[in-house]
Image (tube, rainbow, N blue to C red):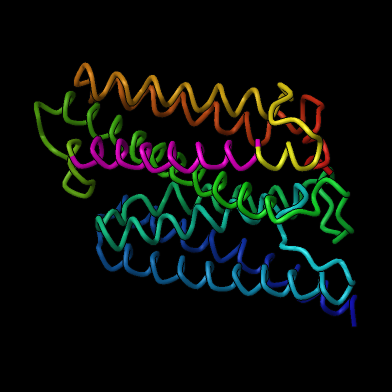
Amino acid sequence: MDMMAHQTNTLLLSIATFVYVGAMFLYLFGLVFKKKFLDAGGFAIFILAFLIETAGLIARWIESYHLNYGHIPITNLYESLIFLSWTVAIMYIIVDLKYKARKLGFPVSLLAFMFMAYASFSPNVSSRIEPLVPALKSNWLTFHVVTSFFGYSAFALAFGASVFYLISDWYTTHTNGKVLSYLPSTKVLDDLSYKLIIVGEVLLAIGIITGAAWADYAWGRYWSWDPKETWSLITFLIYIVYIHLRYSWGWHGKSAAIFSIIGFMFVLFTYLGVNLVLSGLHSYGST
């Protein structure tokens, strides 16, 4: 029964991985051929992938209870990669419905696929469900990880908007002001990136605060300059600089887009690089 449950959740998550690929190619063809029906198809396939991934996460959560572990599936590298893909997807769906930013579907589906493919096919990542170490047996785990990952997802979408900004800006500059009709205007992309960074920064701040409360509960101190803590703070400060430059100096456009892209590199290192390269109190997340 447990083996069947494990096969069910891994099968669903594997299917979702390849469905994201289908969405990615439809979005790409929509960009190349400038056909709205391809974008609509990409969004429909993306929603399907998201629903299958959601079912896979729920199945994995249920399986943990069958094993008498009973924990939300966000406690190791495999689960966190899947969960990050899921939060990126749900954040994109919200942004698309509110801002009609369908063209962001290509970088988002690419990121979702890359996270899930790394989780599924990397020899360094195990899909086994294991009991929690004592430090993880706390409700703070859910608050800390969920808020942090939704923050990372907002930064990921800001990254996508900033990449498209640079593409559109370059095209406009080198074609005598001709605008890419199939991308949102540079003004919309610039504004969207800024709003997403604000959302991401608030969520990351909550993640850091809940992480400090969890650290005090688990280890008796709020802050220990663990590599993950340190790099989370560095990432937070990077985006604080972005917001300050934007708010105080009216900073926007190409420089802001480049800054946003650099900021997301810090996000990736904070999330993945620290676990794989450095060791510390968060090293349990690397296996």
User: How far across and how far down the image is residue 25, in percent?
Assistant: 45, 57
In the picture, which quadrant includes the C terminus?
top right
Q: Who's the residue at 39% across and 54% down the image? A: 105
The stretch in magenta equals 188-212
**Residue 17 versus residue 11 in the image, above or below:** above
Q: Quadrant of residue 255?
A: top left
Judged left or right of residue 172, residue 26 is right
User: How far across and how far down the image is residue 112, in percent?
Assistant: 55, 52
User: How far across and how far down the image is residue 94, in percent?
Assistant: 36, 60
User: How far across and how far down the image is residue 16, in percent?
Assistant: 61, 66
Number of disc labels: 0
Judged left or right of residue 15, residue 104 is left
Q: Who's the residue at 38% across and 22% down the image? A: 259
**Residue 66 versus residue 278 in the image, above or below:** below
Residue nearer the viewer, 59 or 172: 59
Q: Who's the residue at 60% across and 63% down the image? A: 18
Kindly report the secondary structure that dominates the magenta region of the rendered protein.
Answer: helix
Residue nearer the viewer, 98 or 243: 243
Within the magenta stretch, is there residue 207? Answer: yes
Judged left or right of residue 115, residue 156 is left
Within the magenta stretch, is there residue 129? Answer: no
**Direction bottom: furthest residue:** 1
In the picture, which quadrant includes the N terminus?
bottom right
Residue nearer the viewer, 119 or 38: 119
Q: Who's the residue at 86% across and 66% down the image? A: 69
